[in-house]
Image (cartoon, rainbow, N blue to C red):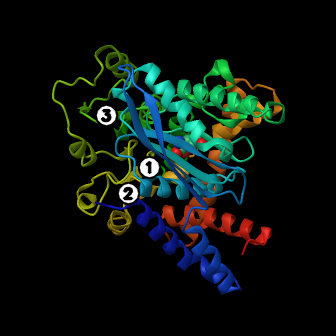
Amino acid sequence: MHNPYQDAVTQLELVAKRLESEYEDKKRFQTAISLLKTPETLHEGMLEITLDSGKKQSFKAFRSQHSNVRGPYKGGIRFHPGVTKEEVKALSLWMSWKTAAVNIPYGGAKGGVIVDPRKLSTTELEQLSRAYVRFLGTAIGPWIDVPAPDVNTTPQIMAWMADEYERMQQESNTAHLQNPLASFTGKPLGLGGSLGREEATGLGGVYILEELAKKLAWKRKQDITIAIQGFGNVGYWFAAHAVTAGYKVVAVSDSKTGIYDPNGLDPVAILASKRKTGQLTAASPLSNQELLELGVDVLVPAALENVITAENAAMIKATTIIEMANGPTTPEADEILAKRNVTVIPDILANAGGVSTSYFEWVQNLSGSYWSKQMVLEKLQPLMTTAFDAIWSLHLAEKTTVRLAAYQVAVRRVIDALFLRGRV
Ligand code: GLU
């Protein structure tokens, strides 16, 4: 089994080799790098809930707080049967680089619970969400650690969590000191959520796609074909906005099956039918592996990590990969893709639209002033394109992969903050 945390450390070591020459004090630089390999705090515990049957059941839970050197810890919580400690640790490192890559004032963290939420009733899911907040207790809060949705966690789950956080504050008579709504992002609009947050990750990826189209001088958008693995919140919104922008989405898939039509798909209609039947339906279904190897221009992994590996990297026909999932490409696959001149826009840049809009939500909660959707998007687009431009220029100037360029920008910001604080 691939260890995503080991991959995250390998990526950090690769960028350290490139960055070292920029730092005079090599010893101090190396101390910073070794510090950044390990999360600052790892919370681990069991969440017990009472099932509808009256039986008790416990679920393993984690929160990895990697770095708060640039601001409060920030990152989602995933509910998935495949969650592991190593995965959560890796994801927390990637969050630190992501918030630094787009230069928003946060650190990095990630949470996870080993559970298949589809097997829980709504009341069981609510209990689990509230238990997760109790498990973290005072380790989270608007100026400490601000969780958000990730795989299988929804605005409703964030609402329960924010409510539980507020109850805890009331119990300890500290509610007047905190702004409970700013303790979680990705909340529903009726409870302090931000306009634009739900679609922000997918839309942010399409902003990057549009910038890339300019840099690579793509002529006719309608000739650019796209395959998307994953049809959750991220994959769906990427597909919908890509089609609106004029690109041709020819394939999408969820965890069970895929749909392919060389003439182009209508994501809105596919979502409507998935909602009705509970699954993607296709005349001639496509496996996830077949989707990854389709002869398309752009491949968009938008589900889980470790899908582009040393085993299939040579078979990928797309010339561009936009990583909307976190960690979809292993370092070995990255090397193969780089040799084959496949342009990979890394996760820490491509999917940063979500956490960036989380930042806008948090700012709105703290200030008590709410923005129109237009205002949100007017801030999101320049934030994404500025980050893209800086990283793209560095990639050209240093003849390096876009991932290494993004890591160079991000890790440098984190190290500089460590130096400024005198933590190393
Ligand atoms: N889970 C998302 C991510 O991986 C969003 C995190 C956030 O908004 O804090 O970027």
Which residue is disc 3 drawn over?
254
Residue at figure coordinates x 60%, y 76% from the top left: 19
Q: Amino acid at mark 3?
A: Asp
Left-right relation of 309 to 194: left
Residue 59 to residue 412: above or below: above
Q: Residues within 10 Å of mark 2 (few under 14, many from 20)?
A: many
Q: Amino acid at mark 1?
A: Glu
In this orientation, does residue 33 appear? yes
Left-right relation of 424 to 398: right
Which residue is disc 1 drawn over?
323
The quadrant of the rendered image in which ligand 1 is seen is top right
In this orientation, does residue 353 appear? no
Q: Earlier in the sequence, mark 3 or mark 1?
A: 3
Left-right relation of 59 to 63: left
Residue at figure coordinates x 49%, y 53% from the top left: 91
User: Looking at the image, do the residues carrying marks 1 and 2 touch, with CB atoms under 8 Å apart?
Assistant: yes
Q: Position of residue 95 (x, y in %)?
A: 57, 53
Q: Nearer the viewer, residue 237 or 194?
A: 194
The numbered mark at residue 329 is 2
Residue at figure coordinates x 72%, y 51% from the top left: 105
Residue at figure coordinates x 70%, y 29% from the top left: 166
Q: Residue furthest left?
A: 284
Q: Residue furthest front?
A: 55
Q: Earlier in the sequence, mark 1 or mark 2?
A: 1
Q: Residues within 10 Å of mark 3 (few under 14, many from 20)?
A: some
